Image (tube, helix red, strand yellow):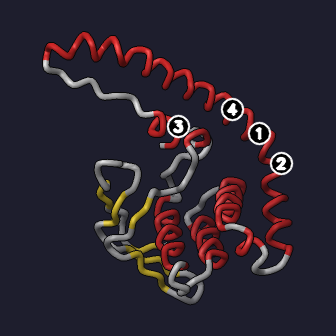
Amino acid sequence: MPFDGRVVVTPILPEGKRWCVVEQFSYTGKTDTLVVPRGTITDFASVPRVFTCLLPRYGRWTQAAILHDYLWSSAASGTISKFDANGVFNRALRELGVPFLRRWIMWTAVQWAAGPRAWLQRGPKTVIKMLAVSLPTLPVVLPAAIVIFVALIVGVTAEFITYLPLRLIHRDKGKDVNAPELSETLSS
């Protein structure tokens, strides 16, 4: 097993979208052992809301996603490149038994997020791989994302429509009615 330790996190409040690692764990790759220390901040897999039904933010890949968040934070100090962090992520996903297509979609997503510098760091081969995964995936993923986005808009609209009457009804009763948040609905 490439990972030693378990995932123990606590939410960072009040936002609740990011988590703090409470117990360190480690990953042993081909030659190195990488330790994810206590205090590492993660959002698990950084999946946009419209895609979470196709690819949840946590699952078999949770440790790899947290390791990737840690490695990307380390890339800022120059201890590892985003390209190499993405490579470790891909390898860890494979070692955790993440199915081939899902693993490559996840790798491609983090490669796109890394930006042009990482795309071209090792020549055009990386961009060709990214396109080879992205282009056939789009016709499958995009229609589902559009339907989910429309459903999210309908849901947030319903929240806004019901919020004002509920607030008026409950204001004299001393009950708080939490206001809907557009950004919470669409981005979480």
Sequence-earlier tag: 3 or 4: 4
Labels 2 & 1 near each other (Cβ < 8 A): yes
Q: Quadrant of residue 96?
A: bottom right
Labels 2 & 3 near each other (Cβ < 8 A): no
Mark 4 vs mark 2, foreground winner is 4
Residue 187 left/right relative to 20: right
- Number of the label disc, if any, that sits on residue 146: 4
- Residue picked out by circle 2: 136
Q: Secondary structure at mark 2?
A: helix
Measured Cα–Cα span from mark 3 to mark 1: 21 Å
Measured Cα–Cα span from mark 3 to mark 4: 12 Å
Amino acid type, label 4? Ile
Amino acid type, label 1? Val
- Residue picked out by circle 1: 140
Amino acid type, label 3? Leu
Amino acid type, label 2? Pro
Mark 1 vs mark 4, foreground winner is 4
- Number of the label disc, if any, that sits on residue 186: 3
Q: Secondary structure at mark 4?
A: helix
Residue drawn 82% across and 67% down? Answer: 127
Mark 2 vs mark 3, foreground winner is 3
Labels 4 & 2 near each other (Cβ < 8 A): no
Q: Residues within 10 Å of mark 3 (few under 14, many from 20)?
A: some
- Number of the label disc, if any, that sits on residue 182: none
- x then y, percent, for residue 91: 62, 72
Nearest the viewer among 128 and 54 is 128
Residue drawn 64% across and 68% down? Answer: 90
